[in-house]
Every structure is written in C-alpha cells, then in structure tokens.
Amino acid sequence: MGSECPAVPRNLRGVYESPRGRRTPPARTFDAATIGAPWPQSIGAHCTCQALGRGRPRAGPAPLAVEYDPHVDAIACATAYGGAEHLARALGLFHATLPVWDLERAERFWHELLGIERHPMPSYAPNSVVFLDLGNTMIHLARYGDDVPRPDPRSTHVAIEVDALDEAIAEVKRRGLTVLRESLRRPDGALSFYFVDTEGNRIELIQRAAQR
C-alpha cells in the first residue's frame, strides 16, 4: 500500500475497525479530499476503512472497501484509536483583529505610538480593513459602523511586545488615553502596562526583562 489513500466517493461514509475487531463509528462523512491525506508513521497500527454506500455513489461501484496502512488517512486512524493524534497543528498566530470606528485615526495612532506600518499583504477589503505588520504576525483593524457597540475593555485584550515600554507609556498618557493598570512586573521579570486605545480596545504593552 502506498502513502496515499484512494479517492472515496463523496457520499460514502467510513466505518473503522481496530486490530481487536472493535468497530468505531466515524465522527463525520469524508470526501476524497479529506480521506486522501498522508498521515505520519506515529499511528503505529493498521486500521481498516469500509466505506458503506448511502444510496448510489456518483461514480464507481458500491460498496467500496479500502485497507489503510499507518501512513495514511489521519481521520480514519485518529477516529479508530480514540483521537490520540492531532489532525492538525497550530503553526502560530496569523493575526488578531481589533474593531475600530475610525480607520484612519486608528492606523495613525498605531503608527505614531509604536511605528507600526501597513503589512505588504493586500487587504481583502481595503476600505474597511487595514493589515498592520508586527513582524511575525499581523493586527487587522476592522472598521464598524455606529450600530455596533464598542467593546468592553474588561472582556479581552491584545498584548504587543515593545522595546521601550517607558516611552510608550509616556506617549499614551500624553494623549490622555485611559490607563487601566500602571506598569506591573510579572513573575518572569517582564513589565506590562494596560490602557484603552482610541477605539475602546484594551491593550497590553509588554517588555521582557532581556530587552531592558
């Protein structure tokens, strides 16, 4: 058996069987795209998928039976063995979105406070969403109308790492923005500071001990 799973008609549903003969119902219906993905060797055991037709398949004979080896079909093997393996892994935070009501004001604020520029990636809605470049991630400024209530700054926040916290704090205070918590030393030695930005979002600025 190769490292690729044969395509399964879209209207076929898998039933999986462990080496002990225990039949485990699938968590979902699988199409050719999801059932054909390669899988790491870490499963360490064979599992069998017997695809049972639900009505007539669009193409090919039914029923269809396929035997899988440890290299293939993440969904089948993870279902049969209790989901011990992750089907996908997080690679990092792609972006965080801040709601804004004045897009130009918000973009100008972040540029003047921390020197943040627009990300070179083009926005999918340039008149209402601006992508800001934070190096290894992005902040999306998304404009809303007055019919959308302002965020409650107690409920959530975005933390941005800076290289000169004292200067940033001084600028926040100079602008008259609401300070939620003065500079606080964390157990790891980092300093953090909380305030409310021009759009009502709770923001944490943090500087690690190694950067001071």
Image (tube, rainbow, N blue to C red):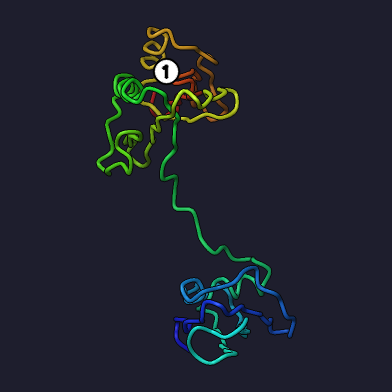
Residue 191 seen anywhere in this rendered image of the structure: no
The x and y percentages for residue 34 are 50, 71
Q: Residue at x 61, y 80 (%)?
A: 45
The x and y percentages for residue 5 are 48, 82
**Residue type beneath disc 1:** Thr
Q: For the image shown, how many numbered marks are present on the structure? A: 1
Q: Residue at x 57, y 28 (%)?
A: 187
Residue 141 vs residue 162, the one in the foreground = 141
Q: Quadrant of the C terminus?
A: top left
The x and y percentages for residue 208 are 44, 29
Q: Is residue 48 above or below residue 81?
A: below
Q: Residue at x 33, y 23 (%)?
A: 114
Q: Secondary structure at mark 1?
A: loop
Location of residue 56 by image quarter: bottom right
Instruction: Left or right? Give the position of 35 relative to 23.
Output: left
Location of residue 80 by image quarter: bottom right
Q: Residue at x 48, y 30 (%)?
A: 158
User: What residue is disc 1 on?
Assistant: 198
